[in-house]
Image (cartoon, rainbow, N blue to C red):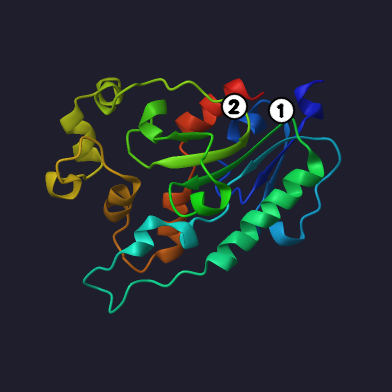
Amino acid sequence: MENKDKVVVDLCGGSGNWSKFYDEAGYQVINVDILYGLDVHHYIPPENVYGILSAPPCLEFSLARNGINKYMTEAPKRNLSAGMELVKTCQRIIDSCSPVFWVIENPTGLLRRFLGKPIYTFHPWQYGDPWTKRTDLWGKFNIPKPIYQSQQECLDNLGEPVTEYLRKQKISPSIRKGKLLPSKADLDKTHFKYTGMRAERSAFRAETPLGFARAFYEVNK
């Protein structure tokens, strides 16, 4: 089967980062996201779907919602039922297609309570994107082999001094708090000048790291 005959569905695809390399290789990529006029709740997939990538929003499952900061009068409330409704929708689509490979992605959090132990957990720095964000994967897929075994090894391969990289990213020692690499949340704080840019900041944090996306594609063609 040629690539042009393979359909890859990107559920809650957002930026399209995860399916980017399938698209560039000539696959029929369908990004099912409200940004592109497709609502995953009402989506009916075509026949013979080859692969499904799914990244339902992590808001209700995020461990960050456990805490409270100086700007809050109380800790954020969760709606796990609403969060699971979208996850179950992704699962129904997957079950209806029986694809060659499929995967559900979420930052490490409370989704483990519902889906059990993930098949694989990774950080973006393992695939060359120099930040941390512990991320879980469930499904039926080939696990991409990490490129780097340590954060230091990732930093050493940036092609420029670490101090210069951090300067460009505007990551100060006070933000990193002694960490070798910043988290995606750290980058969020420095990339966005205005705190009110809620949608933009959420989209930025949710983007699939391209290094991982490329590695995933290479072993799940």
Neighbor class of circle 1 (other Cα within 10 Å; few <14, some 14-19, many 20+) is: some
Neighbor class of circle 2 (other Cα within 10 Å; few <14, some 14-19, many 20+) is: some
Residue visible at 71% across and 28% down? Answer: 26
Residue visible at 63% across and 29% down? Answer: 141
- Real-space Cα separation, disc 2 to disc 1, in angstroms: 12 Å
Inspect the image, locate mark 2, and give the three-letter code of the amino acid beneath it.
Tyr
Q: Position of residue 130 (x, y in %)?
A: 32, 33
- What SS does tag 1 mark? loop
- What SS does tag 2 mark? helix
Quadrant of the snapshot with the C terminus: top right
Residue visible at 39% across and 65% down? Answer: 197
Q: Quadrant of residue 41?
A: bottom right
Tell me if I can see residue 18 in this picture.
no
Quadrant of the snapshot with the N terminus: top right
Q: Position of residue 146 (x, y in %)?
A: 43, 22
In-image side of 27 versus 125 (left or right): right
Q: Earlier in the sequence, mark 2 or mark 1?
A: 1
Q: Position of residue 60 (x, y in %)?
A: 48, 62
In-image side of 176 versus 78 (left or right): left
Q: Using the image as rendered, state which of residue 119 and residue 221 is in the foreground.
A: 119
- Of circles 2 and 1, the one toward us is 2
Q: Is residue 156 above or below residue 109?
A: above
Q: Position of residue 83 (x, y in %)?
A: 56, 62
Q: Using the image as rendered, state which of residue 103 and residue 195 is in the foreground.
A: 103
Residue visible at 38% across and 27% down? Answer: 126
Label 1, on which residue?
26
In-image side of 192 versus 98 (left or right): left
Label 2, on which residue?
217
